Image: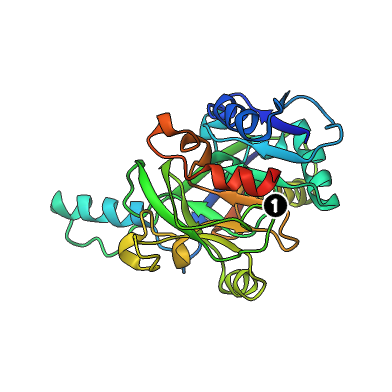
Amino acid sequence: MKSHVIVFPGSNCDRDVAVAIKNISGQKPEMLWHKETSIDHSDLIVVPGGFSYGDYLRCGAMASTSPIMQDVVKKAKEGVPVLGICNGFQILIESGLLDGALMRNSSLSFICRDVLIKSKNKSSVFTRKSKLAKMPIAHNEGNFFATSEQLKKIEDNDQIAFQYCDENGNVEQSSNPNGSLANIAGILNENKNVLGMMPHPERAAEKIHGCDDGKIIFESIFN
Amino acid sequence: MLAKIYITLKKDVLDPQGSVIANSLKSLGFNNVEDVRQGKFIEIKLNNKDKDDAQKQLGEMCEKLLANLVIEDYKIEIE
């Protein structure tokens, strides 16, 4: 399996996700600087977390205009799996690959802690092995918003990948860390080959991290 | 010419920062404050001669990059 990790100025989860991919797939991903213009054959493209371009204007807005993103969008439309984590999710939204918007957390605070998530969609390449999982979030702008038309489309088309929930898997307002609409932690595109998610599976991918629930997402992709 | 662009959250989008600003103003004694909405202000210097052309291009800039139309509205003023 050939995978690629895009690196922007300000990315800071690129190496973590590369380690997780190497450990789970057995193959080291190729790191691609954002100034590159094309991606060779790929089985997975990752847009990693971080603070690309210092979050100028809106998180992910500047990175979405980077040269490499044209080919990321093209490959996504051809069906290549694309995974955006945290800032990567923001970049995929700004690129138009995913619906909605990620606004400032309703608490107006940066949140860095473990959350529980469960998958709603259970058939995509990313979620087919999913179970209730614990992984960290670390963001200031993870408050998912969509227009009522967009939300209806996302719900009707089974595009909700993950929702924040409690230890029994109940999706309640009390387990919503950031004010996201419908407790949404991650969404898929219409064709289910693009996933954007705020929690960090790569930071919960080995026992030494304290939890390895995040592995399940990479195992879904690679096995 | 100089363009001034105002980007604000749409009316039906909650603005927690605006609410906090409103509360702070009230705590300073400005009890007449009813509501605060905060946003962005961007100045763009252009070398266009024609104002209509500039208006059109600025609209494209807002739609393509400067504003996120899911949550934001924009207003353009040209001096």
Residue A101, compared with residue A223, is above or below; it is below
Q: Is residue A30 visible?
A: yes
Residue A67 picture location, percent across and down: 78, 31
Residue B44 in the image, given as x and y percentages of width and height: 63, 36
Identify residue for label 1.
Answer: A194
B4 up-or-down from A143: above or below: above
Give residue A14's position: percent from left, percent from top: 59, 28
Regarding residue B73, the answer to whether it shows in the image is no
Total marks drawn?
1
- Foreground residue among A177 and A44: A44
State which quarter of the image contains the N terminus of chain A: top right
Q: Amino acid at mark 1?
A: Val
- Could you tell me which residue is drawn at 63 percent across and 65 percent down? A159
**Measured along the vertical axis of the image, is residue B66 above or below residue B22?**
above
Residue A165 percent location from the top left of the image: 39, 61
Question: Which of the pair A162/A65 is nearer the observer?
Answer: A162
* Frontmost residue, A93 versus B14: A93
Q: Residues within 10 Å of mark 1 (few under 14, many from 20)?
A: many
Q: Chain of mark 1?
A: A
Q: Is residue A164 left or right of residue B66?
A: left
- Quadrant location of residue A46? top right
Q: Taking B62 as reference, is B14 left or right?
A: left
Q: Say which residue appears at 75% left-offset and 24% top-offset.
A: A35
What SS does tag 1 mark? Answer: strand
Colour mode of the rendering = rainbow
Examine the image and state in which quarter residue B14 appears. Answer: bottom left
Q: Residue at x 46, y 65 (%)?
A: A181
